[in-house]
Image (cartoon, grey):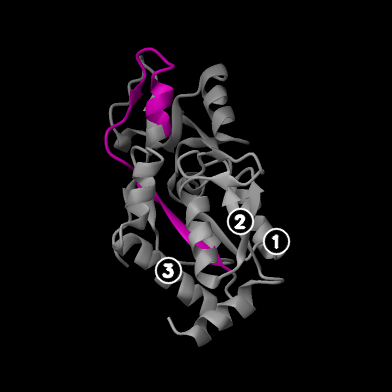
């Protein structure tokens, strides 16, 4: 990219030499922890640091407890770029890059469940526990016609809700469900996936030059092995680098 384009992106996105980076802390696969100074680390925060480095500005992380709050805050101009699942509902208000990483979504059922495969989920009487306004909640809301979606405030609470309310199905990211499966004797994670959460970077639609640059940045991080190296660095299992756009 030319210096003039980078300067234009700086003018669109930054103020006082600072880039505000929105991070969804609820995705444990992409946010591995918090440093002593309060800044997050993991795949998504590290990509934010790399982008800020390209612009020669300082990243300031704005951390949200769930993706819904992150998306809402974008409407108020609370961040300059953000890392969050790319879903059609969010794309109305966020100019997304192509995905940099994909996470499969499936379901967990109990040992005595008669459900054998994904095609049997959407039936009357099945209650599906999910995290409210997660990418997979948005997907299921658009697709589920007969089963009932029961929402909880967080991933942990969706698990507790599944247990305590004796719900039939727990929906979520496959790596997390495989971990949850170990806590429930005899439970099963269904084979395959209903969709994948496509993790992307985004900015406000009005920032057209910056959106294009962010897209190009993400494509480079995939092509040069940056994303795959971050997956290895943080020992994140069950995810894959998204294909080239």
Q: Spatial distance from mark 2 to mark 3, Cα to Cα?
A: 17 Å
Label 2 vs 3, first from the N-terminus: 2
Residue at 34% across, 43% down: 232
Q: In which quarter of the image is the N terminus?
A: bottom left
Label 1 vs 3, first from the N-terminus: 1
Label 2 vs 1, first from the N-terminus: 2
Residue identifier under label 3 = 217
The reply to whether the C-beta atoms of the residues labelled 2 and 1 are less than 8 Å apart is: yes
Between 179 and 228, the residue placed more toward the observer is: 228
Magenta region, residue range? 176-203
Residue 40: percent from left, percent from top: 58, 45
Residue at 56% across, 67% down: 203
Q: Spatial distance from mark 1 to mark 3, Cα to Cα?
A: 22 Å
Residue identifier under label 1 = 78
Residue at 60% across, 59% down: 21
Residue 73: percent from left, percent from top: 68, 57
């Amino acid at each position: 990219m030319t210096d003039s384009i980078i300067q234009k992106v700086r003018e669109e996105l930054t103020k006082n030499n600072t880039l505000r980076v929105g991070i969804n802390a609820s995705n444990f696969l992409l946010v591995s922890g918090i440093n002593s100074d309060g800044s997050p680390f993991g795949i998504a925060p590290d990509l934010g640091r790399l982008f800020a480095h390209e612009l020669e500005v300082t990243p300031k992380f704005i951390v949200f407890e769930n993706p819904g709050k992150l998306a809402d805050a974008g409407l108020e101009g609370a961040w300059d770029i953000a890392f969050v699942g790319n879903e059609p509902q969010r794309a109305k208000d966020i100019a997304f890059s192509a995905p940099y990483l994909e996470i499969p979504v499936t379901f967990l059922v109990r040992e005595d469940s008669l459900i054998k495969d994904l095609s049997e989920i959407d039936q009357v009487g099945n209650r599906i526990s999910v995290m409210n306004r997660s990418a997979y909640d948005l997907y299921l809301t658009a697709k589920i016609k007969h089963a009932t979606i029961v929402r909880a405030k967080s991933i942990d609470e969706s698990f507790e809700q599944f247990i305590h309310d004796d719900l039939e199905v727990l929906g979520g990211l496959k790596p997390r469900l495989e971990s949850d499966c170990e806590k429930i004797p005899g439970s099963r994670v269904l084979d395959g996936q209903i969709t994948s959460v496509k993790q992307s970077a985004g900015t406000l639609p009005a920032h057209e030059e910056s959106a294009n640059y962010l897209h190009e940045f993400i494509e480079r991080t995939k092509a040069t092995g940056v994303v795959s190296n971050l997956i290895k660095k943080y020992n994140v299992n069950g995810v894959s680098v998204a294909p080239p756009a």
